[in-house]
Image (cartoon, helix red, strand yellow):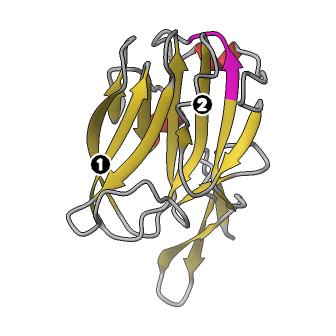
Amino acid sequence: MPITFLNTSGVGNFTLVNNTNSGRLTMSVTSSVQYNAGLFKTTYAGYFADNVSFFATATPATYGANPATTIQTTIIQEPSSDDGSSFSIQWLGYFKPITTETYTFFTNSDDASYMWIGANALSGFTTANSTVNNGGAHGNQERSGTSTLTAGVYYPVRMQFGESGGGDVFGFNYSTPTITKTTNVTGLVFYNPATNGF
């Protein structure tokens, strides 16, 4: 009799089957997630002020040129368009690398931004365990962090950005030893349309 385990990471369900011919257990993975192209972007009124839990209770809102929600498929950004002060944005979804190697991720932002990839993107995310920590109120600056990834795996990714006052900008890019630094994430980012994220 097969035994099925629900995988709470959202990647799928694991089924163990006892193979009577060999006496061994075999495992198969059934995906329960539909992957659509892009990251799901939500804009909120109010500056999150490095409080990563802000987004759990904040209400999505149209703010300046930002619709409350949208999908970004080619470039993950908040353009420098001076949409005003005191708003925040969160992107949710998956990053699926095309190569197995160490990826360097960058955010450039004015003001604070953070990025998580892997298990920390799903739960337990803090400023201290972020892959990229570009926190605090500041002018446009770039920070980076690294993660070793396996090609073809859907890694949960979460990005947060906040604008306190003055100019506003957020940009995301990445590089590897074999991929030149780029903002183009076409074919690399996905989201679950059932949950608008993971």
Amino acid type indicated by mark 2: Gln
> Where is residue 31, by image quadrant?
bottom right
Q: Which residue carries the number 1 mark?
A: 147
In the image shown, does 147 or 188 lie closer to the viewer? 188
Coordinates of residue 131 in the picture (x, y in percent): 34, 36
State whether residue 82 is above or below residue 14.
above
Coordinates of residue 99 in the picture (x, y in percent): 34, 70
Amino acid type indicated by mark 1: Ser
Q: Residue at x 49, y 12 (%)?
A: 166
**Foreground disc of the pair 1, 2:** 2
> Where is residue 5, by image quadrant?
bottom right
Magenta region: 43-47
Q: Is residue 93 magenta?
A: no
Coordinates of residue 128 in the picture (x, y in percent): 32, 21
Element under disc 2: strand
Disc number at residue 29? none
Element under disc 1: strand
104 sits to left or right of 182: left
Spatial CA distance of label 1 from label 2 is 20 Å
Q: Quadrant of the C terminus?
A: top right
Q: Which residue carries the number 2 mark?
A: 90
In the image shown, does 10 or 194 lie closer to the viewer? 194
Coordinates of residue 192 in the picture (x, y in percent): 70, 51
Which residue is at the far front? 81
Q: Residue at x 51, y 59 (%)?
A: 154
Q: Main secondary structure of the magenta part?
A: strand
Q: Residue at x 57, y 75 (%)?
A: 18
Q: Earlier in the sequence, mark 1 or mark 2?
A: 2
Note whether residue 176 is visible.
Answer: yes
Q: Residue at x 75, y 36 (%)?
A: 69
149 sits to left or right of 18: left
